[in-house]
Image (cartoon, rainbow, N blue to C red):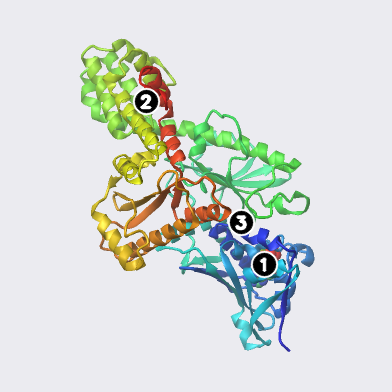
Amino acid sequence: MEKRLYLKIQPKVIDHLGIKMYQKPVDVIAEYIANAWDADSEEVSVILENIKITVSDKGDGMTFNECQDCYLQVGRDRREVSGKDTSNRKERPVLGRKGIGKFAGFGVAKTITVDTISRATGEKTVFKMDIDSILEYDVQKEDNKIIEVVEYCEPDEYRKENHGTTIILERMDLSFGADLIDNFKKELSRRFLLTQFYDDFVVLINDEPLPHNFNDEMEFVFPRDLTEDEKNKFPKVTSFNNNGWAVEDFDEFEIKWRIGFYEEPIKVEELRGIGVYVKGKLAQKPFFFDLTGGISAQNSLEYMTGQVQMDFIDTGENNLISTERQRINLQTELGKKIKVWGIEKIKEWGSIWKSRRSEKRLADINDKISGFRNRLDALPRTERRTVETVLKKIATFDRLGQARFKEWCADILTSWEKGRLRNIITELAEQDELDETQFIEILSEADVLTALNIAESVKTKIVAIGELKERVKSKELENKVRDYIYEHPWLIHPKWETYRKERSVEKLIKDIADKELKVDVFQGRVDLVLSSGQDLLLVEFMRPGLSLDRDHLDRINYYVMGVRRELAKQTGLQFRHVDSAYVIADNKNSAEDVTERILQLQEKKIFVLTWESLISQALKQWGDYLDLIKLRNPEDIRIQEL
Ligand SMILES: Nc1ncnc2c1ncn2[C@@H]1O[C@H](COP(=O)(O)OP(=O)(O)O)[C@@H](O)[C@H]1O
Ligand SMILES: [Mg+2]
């Protein structure tokens, strides 16, 4: 008799489960890795191909009946059904929860093929779920959907040893360039602590194990770097070094934490904040426990990353994990307590960081002003102390580039040496908490702003932004706007100040486009190619007023991926990879599919920026200064209008 499988599901449910809930490939794959863990597999291999993802495990697999009764059931709580929350053989804590993880694949692919061999019987079953045909049943209001059985083989003693399950996601509109895989690995390793805790669980991405170095490139790591004094600030911690984790009592439960601070503000959103893990799997993406309002060590948040383990929050009445596992619920009694705990900790970590950092900065600062040592030493002792204090303050202004730092210091020194501005410089030395804005303020009040030419450089920038705004408003031809940004790439992002236009590479890119893409998608060019070191940056402009559509996005994707692939192939080139690509366009009335597409492209570092936000972003960069400049230039209409 022909074998048949059914999927019983309410109309639209599947749509919500897979398509809406999981849009990031990393989240999707995390579900399949969790399933492999639950199936007692010792190894999971994830293969990312151009438009295909394969996840295979060596777990217990499934019999034909299990495919029907366990896999193809929606919302089956396996812990409830089996009456235990550990896995069958290895007694691992079970990650499976609501019986919906298997649909995650529909977030990125149209078909999910399951190929499984049961460890118990040696039966082999291959079946394929196709979202289009499942949804077709929905149209017909048919709840019982027939699932295509691709292959079925009877129980077999010899086959038993090949037990395991392979999930294949196909018909995807994603592709993975070589340069994205590294990033991908990092992101995935952040979702699981399991591979660090258990020797019998290995995750391979394209044949390489997941990296898991929490300390990578961090400036401070707690509890590792805590001094004895600092440890006293955590009275409930019972162990400060449990393989790098602090173990802390929390009522009758236990929380483990480890926190790191980067030297630079964290740009990757995925990293910033504290991730909450339950049984080794991420249950709450990094956040700050809904912290609102200021804390004294506020800017510590920009540097903070961390992991907290709370294994107690997914059992029975304490179930705080949301369905798609990206959030925990802080509204319940327990949730509220956790929130209080988290915020308290964040403040504590932040304040320790703050004093640590200033100690370290002090050393750095001495280093930084060493270039002015001779001139400082030439001054009488008390004078030297005053000027040195001011220079050290300037050295703490993070936003000041190296060049401007030197400029300011030199100006201050020269002024002092010439006997000018001594009152003000003394005043500056005496002020304790001084940020760069206040610093300029004091100088500007004394009308010496221009003497230090800070104003001029900031003003030039602000005027440039104003000009761009005008151009966009009058919907000038994209070429003019393009040329403008060519000259001022920092408008898009301040870190692009170091990027230069790269005419030399335009031909290369064009060749790649011609050769690789055959079709003339962009008439052989993107609008703008910038370079910094080995990195290339591609920017595509659409005329202000013209709205973005899906077609356009697809072409960009195609194009950028092509260039990336080609650069990856040629290792002798001066430019090694495309760091990111930007599409600057209006995006007023974008349809859902456009929005969805934009999110997917973001994964590949292809970003969409509207003209409006381009400008407001640029302005925000200089916002503090802008107010001041406005104040100082009441008669300049261009500035006042910003
Ligand atoms: N890789 C796998 N190996 C063996 N069984 C699996 C695998 N993936 C899923 N299953 C079975 O299918 C069920 C449904 O999986 P899923 O939808 O992820 O829900 P959950 O993990 O919450 O139970 C699992 O409980 C398990 O019985
Ligand atoms: Mg699961």
Q: Position of residue 314 (x, y in %)?
A: 71, 53
Q: Which residue is mark 2?
A: 638
In the displayed structure image, the side of residue 4 where residue 390 appears, left or right: left
Tell me if residue 36 can be seen.
Answer: yes
Tell me the CA gap for discs 3 and 2.
Answer: 56 Å
Viewer-nearest of discs 1 and 3: 1
Q: Is mark 1 within 8 Å of ligand 1?
A: no
Give coordinates of residue 72: x percent, y percent: 71, 71
Q: With respect to residue 391, does 198 lie above or below?
A: below
Residue depicted at 45% across the width and 50% down the height: 607
As displayed, is residue 617 above or below residue 513?
above
Instruction: Give the residue at mark 3.
Output: 280
Q: Nearer the viewer, residue 316 or 443?
A: 443
Give the residue type at disc 2.
Arg
Q: Which mark is residue 135?
A: 1
**Residue at image coords 30%, 34%:** 402
Per the model, the C-alpha gap separating discs 2 and 1 is 56 Å
Provide residue 141's location: percent of width, then percent of height: 75, 67
Query: What's the residue at 54%, 59% (across, down)?
Result: 26
Vertical arrangement, residue 630 with respect to residue 152, above or below: above
Residue labelled 3 has its Cβ within 8 Å of some atom of ligand 2: no
In terms of sequence position, does the residue under pointer 3 or pointer 2 come before the other? 3
Quarter of the image with the N terminus is: bottom right
